[in-house]
Amino acid sequence: MKRNRNRSIGMGVGRSMQRDVDNHGKYAASWWKRSCQFVLRPKWIAAAALSCLLFVPNSSHAERTPDRDEPILLELSALGKQGDTIARAREQVLGILQQQNACSAWFEESDPDPAEVFRSLHFELEASGPSYVYGMRDADRGLLYKHPWAAKAFENAGRNSTIFLNANGPFFIRTSRIMQLDPGGVIARPTGSLVLAISPYTGNSPGAQIVILLHELGHITGRLPSDDDSWDGRSARNTAEVLRHCKVETNAAIHNTSRSNN
Ligand SMILES: [Zn+2]
């Protein structure tokens, strides 16, 4: 089957706005606290042990239902802090897709159960993925910046497939060095830094992370046409299409998370 392996998003082609790179973002990957972490103080241990004894089910009557999320969450925990970031964004995307809203309805045009497709997906990090923003002056479009790719997935890959995340891209990183290309596109020289962005959301922010995952789900379900890591702007147009249907839900998910953390 012919598949494009270079699918990617968030190239930001056409963006020419350079922001203050010393303005450290309000978003940090470590802001998310694992909901299951807690500390057992000595006086609680006896009570906890007792309650375990009292509530151990009789195996002949109660079979444990396997948690559908458990295998994926175990894989993510093995990825350390970056896995925590993915797990938090994954939870927010599941929250969006499990409700009846414009975003889930749009995905349902391609698959009747987009939440379950998303729940089944695996995640892999590309530790040596590209980190630079490339700048180039185009005769028709002016100064263009191509951001490092954020994520990729196979078109129409379906359930149990994988989202590949660039460890040096805007899912995890807020600012990147710019390499300015000469008109021939051959020689590159460093010219400063740029805040990475996925449409209105800065790199390494919950909004960017949610939109990146929704974009890849769009490829996996065939909802979005394929794109690649080029200057043609198709990836940015696909992200704009995701936002056209999912911006309200993305902003609500960000708002709900920040409220529950206060
Ligand atoms: Zn794409």
Image: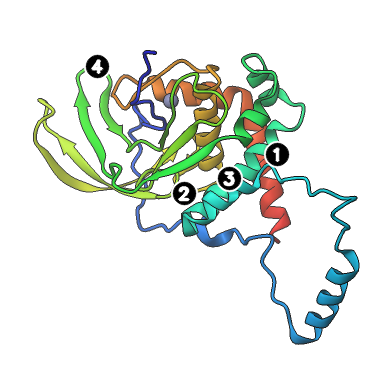
The answer to which of 145 and 125 lies nearer the viewer is 125
Q: Earlier in the sequence, mark 1 or mark 3?
A: 3
The answer to whether marks 2 and 3 mark residues whose Cβ atoms lie closer than 8 Å is no
Q: Secondary structure at mark 2?
A: loop
- Which corner quadrant of the image does residue 140 belong to? top left
Local crowd at mark 4 within 10 Å, few (<14), some, or many (≥20)?
Answer: few
**Badge 4 is on which residue?**
140
Q: How much space separates mark 3 and mark 4, taking CA atoms? A: 46 Å
Please name the residue shown 40% across and 50% down the image. 173
Q: Earlier in the sequence, mark 3 or mark 4?
A: 3
Q: Secondary structure at mark 4?
A: loop
- Given the image, on which type of amino acid does mark 1 rest? Gly
Q: Secondary structure at mark 3?
A: helix
Q: How much space separates mark 2 and mark 4, taking CA atoms? A: 31 Å
Residue 5: image location, x then y, percent: 35, 25
Horizontal side of 121 relative to 167 (left or right) equals right
- Label at residue 32: none
**Badge 3 is on which residue?**
72
**Badge 1 is on which residue?**
95
Local crowd at mark 2 within 10 Å, few (<14), some, or many (≥20)?
Answer: many
Q: Earlier in the sequence, mark 1 or mark 2?
A: 1
- Answer yes or no: disc 1 within 8 Å of ligand 1: no
The answer to which of 151 and 191 lies nearer the viewer is 151
For residue 109, above or below residue 65: above
Please name the residue shown 82% across and 82% down the image. 46
Q: Secondary structure at mark 1?
A: helix
Q: Is residue 28 visible?
A: no
- Which corner quadrant of the image does residue 90 belong to? top right
For residue 9, above or below residue 33: above
Q: How much space separates mark 1 and mark 2, taking CA atoms? A: 20 Å
Closer to viewer: mark 1 or mark 3 = 3
Horizontal side of 61 relative to 77 (left or right) equals right
